[in-house]
Image: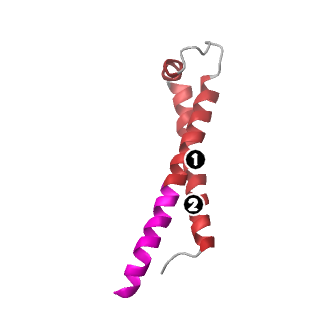
Amino acid sequence: MPLDIRQAVATIFGCAALGTSVGLVVGYSIGTYAPDFIRALFPLASHESSTTQIGAGLGTVSGGFIGVGVGVFIVGLFAWLGPKAGRS
């Protein structure tokens, strides 16, 4: 059974929201517990800059992109396998 457009959009948005949430938590954790890693990524950042905010921002953006990619992959997989599953 192939997905209709509402289900496809909901799948992509859901994966993006989940990826953003996970990325936020991971990025915040890295910024809190490994601030030297963030400073190594951005050597021009001063020591007064908040590594937790930088980590949370980076995690949110990258998690969102990964979530959208996973959602598009899932929708594409259902679109590709949908007609094949109906034949058997």
The quarter of the displayed image where residue 14 is located:
bottom right
Disc on res. 40: none
Q: Is residue 9 magenta?
A: no
Of 49 and 3, which appears nearest the observer? 3
The quarter of the displayed image where residue 81 is located:
bottom left
Cα–Cα span, label 2 and label 1: 10 Å
Q: Secondary structure at mark 1?
A: helix
Q: Which region of the structure is painted magenta?
A: 70-88
Residue furthest left as drawn:
88
Above or below: residue 43 compared with residue 18: above
Mark 1 neighbour density, 10 Å: few (under 14) some (14–19) many (20 or more): many
Identify the amino acid type marked 1: Gly
Mark 2 or 1, nearer chain start: 2
Number of marks present in the image shown = 2
Where residue 27 appears, x then y in whole percent? 55, 35
Disc on res. 64: 1
* Quadrant of the snapshot with the C terminus: bottom left
Q: Secondary structure at mark 2?
A: helix
Where residue 38 appears, x then y in whole percent? 53, 23
Above or below: residue 37 compared with residue 69: above
Q: Is residue 71 magenta?
A: yes
**Residue drawn 56% across the image and 37% down it:** 59
Disc on res. 12: 2
